[in-house]
Image (cartoon, rainbow, N blue to C red):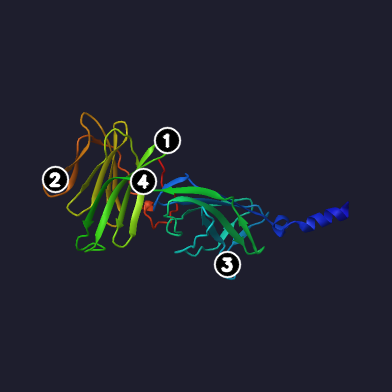
Amino acid sequence: MKRLLVFALSLLPAGSALGQIQVELRFPRVQYVAYEPVVAIVQITNLAGRDIELRDDKGQRWFGFEVTEDEGRFLPVSNQNEEPPLQIESGKSVTRKINLTPLYPIQDLGPYHVRANVFFADLNRFFYSASKVFHVGDARAVWQKTVGVPAGLAGAGGVRTYSVLSNRFPDHTKLYVRVEDKSTGAVYCTYPLGRVIAFDEPQAELDQGNRLHVLHCAAPRTWAYSQVGLNGELLARKTFMETKTRPRLRRAADGGIAIRGGMLDAPVSPNPASKLSARPASVPSDD
């Protein structure tokens, strides 16, 4: 019996006897709009029984993903930043939040399968998460306009196309904005402006600097205002409450855009992590 036990233990992989790392992967939701940030949340738990350091070794990166399209084709990674070594105390967990959109070509419509992997140099072994699936679809354009980029701004002399998009999820509808240069195919941003209810059509206006202003009904008697720049910057977000009058975008004599009616609620700071190129330390709200 002892010989059988020794033989059985010898068949166990090295990680089972010498240490273990648990890798868990999740996404805030399973449906995304094309070019929207897709944030993967990865939790790494040290079950080795000792403190460990995760580090690159002999050209092997210690942290990464395997992303495949529905037919099983592996997608190449681009713009991958070098991950510094990570120390994890025994029994502790560390969570990483990574925007996959600038790293992988995941703009085509359809499902994508993702698996996170961690390389533990001490054991010369990979540890993998379970595979997760998310779906990329495109939203319906409810407003679109192409404008020039004024002198003095980045990309001056070029053109930008603003699109206000609506996407229906199983339990709600969400409004998005996209800024792109259709002549080159460059997409500067696609991010959500928040939930929208079918109480009134969203309003969209351009000011004298060709900045986009959007006002939409986010909840009963609640209106969300957003200002977006020509290169995808989220310049301002505010909430207005409907009182005796309903908030409306109005053009001023100097070409600026003002909001008339309603009452200003607490302003919401712009979230730069919503931009396409961001690799956020925190996840933008999916409300």
- Looking at marks 1 and 4 on the same chain, the residue that comes earlier in the sequence is marked by 4
Instruction: Calculate the distance from the C-alpha at mark 3 to the C-alpha at mark 4.
Output: 39 Å
Q: Secondary structure at mark 4?
A: loop
The 10 Å Cα crowd at callout 4, few under 14, some 14 to 19, many 20 or more, is some
* Disc nearest the viewer among 1 and 4: 4
Instruction: Calculate the distance from the C-alpha at mark 2 to the C-alpha at mark 4.
Output: 31 Å
Instruction: Calculate the distance from the C-alpha at mark 1 to the C-alpha at mark 4.
Output: 16 Å
Q: Which mark is residue 225?
A: none
The residue carrying mark 4 is: 139
- Looking at marks 3 and 4 on the same chain, the residue that comes earlier in the sequence is marked by 3
Q: Secondary structure at mark 3?
A: loop
Q: Which mark is residue 60?
A: 3
* Disc nearest the viewer among 1 and 3: 1
Q: Quadrant of residue 170?
A: top left
The amino acid at mark 2 is Ala
- Looking at marks 1 and 2 on the same chain, the residue that comes earlier in the sequence is marked by 1
The residue carrying mark 1 is: 171
* Residue at 22% across, 33% down: 246
Q: Secondary structure at mark 2?
A: loop
